[in-house]
Amino acid sequence: MRYQIRQRLLTFTAHYDIANEAGEPILEAVRESWFRPQIVIRSKNGVELACLRQKLLTWRPRFDITREGLPLATVVRRMTLKPYFTVDLAEGGRLEVAGSFWEHNYQFTEGGRVIAEVSSKMWSLRDVYGVEVLEAEYDAIVLATVIAIAALNAQSKQSS
């Protein structure tokens, strides 16, 4: 399935609109308060798809992804010469996320096979980038990880 993600620019907290291939808004991701590093992804009728909680006192940037209080995955930024992320799945397994995070061009892989691709070239507008999930069972985890990476990029821009 293909998704479009657009960050709202004139908001006080992180706010992302997620649309389907046709451009119809289906989900939104909103940081709920200034004090809690938590972003909730919901459908337009209020059903929670995933909740991201950033762990603040860690060596590496980290987000825990849950659904209805149950763990789905943990996203960790790895620090090497070229940054990449790992997504440790709650039921076992690991996704690797590598590419150009500032330009929104990267891939999710598991054991060498591509699970999802994120690309700013997929769409014509500058502030919109596309996410193509090749395996439907990873939709929530991939979308939540993309939002986590975007949130970390936004934090890096604000601190510099």
Image (cartoon, helix red, strand yellow):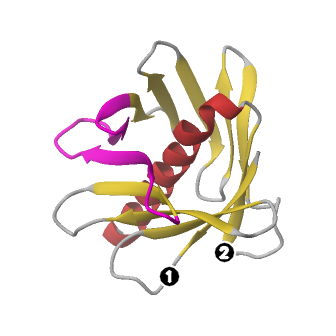
Q: What residue type is labelled 1?
A: Leu
**Residue 20, how many percent across, how many down?**
73, 60
Q: Is mark 2 on a helix, strand or loop?
A: loop
Q: Quadrant of the N terminus?
A: top right
Q: What element carries label 1?
A: loop
- Which residue position is annotated with label 2? 127
Asked if residue 103 lies left or right of residue 51, the reply is right
- Which residue position is annotated with label 1? 9
Mark 2, Cα crowd under 10 Å, few <14 / some 14-19 / many 20+, is few
The Cα atoms of the two marked residues, 2 and 1, are separated by 9 Å
Is residue 66 covered in magenta? yes
Q: Could you say which quadrant of the image residue 124 lies in?
A: bottom right
Asked if residue 82 lies left or right of residue 159, the reply is right
At horizontal 59% and vertical 58% (from top left) the residue drawn is 102
**Residue 2, how many percent across, how many down?**
76, 51
Q: In this view, does 10 lie above or below 6?
A: below
At horizontal 41% and vertical 20% (from top left) the residue drawn is 90
Q: Quick check: marks 2 and 1 in contact, CB under 8 Å?
A: yes
Q: Residue 140 carries which label?
A: none
Q: What residue type is labelled 2?
A: Asp
Give the residues drawn in magenta, as a range: 44-71
> Can residue 78 be spotted in the picture?
no
Mark 1, Cα crowd under 10 Å, few <14 / some 14-19 / many 20+, is few
**Residue 67, how many percent across, how many down?**
38, 38
Q: Which of 43 and 81 is in front in this view?
A: 43
Q: Which numbered disc flags the more N-terminal residue, 2 or 1?
A: 1
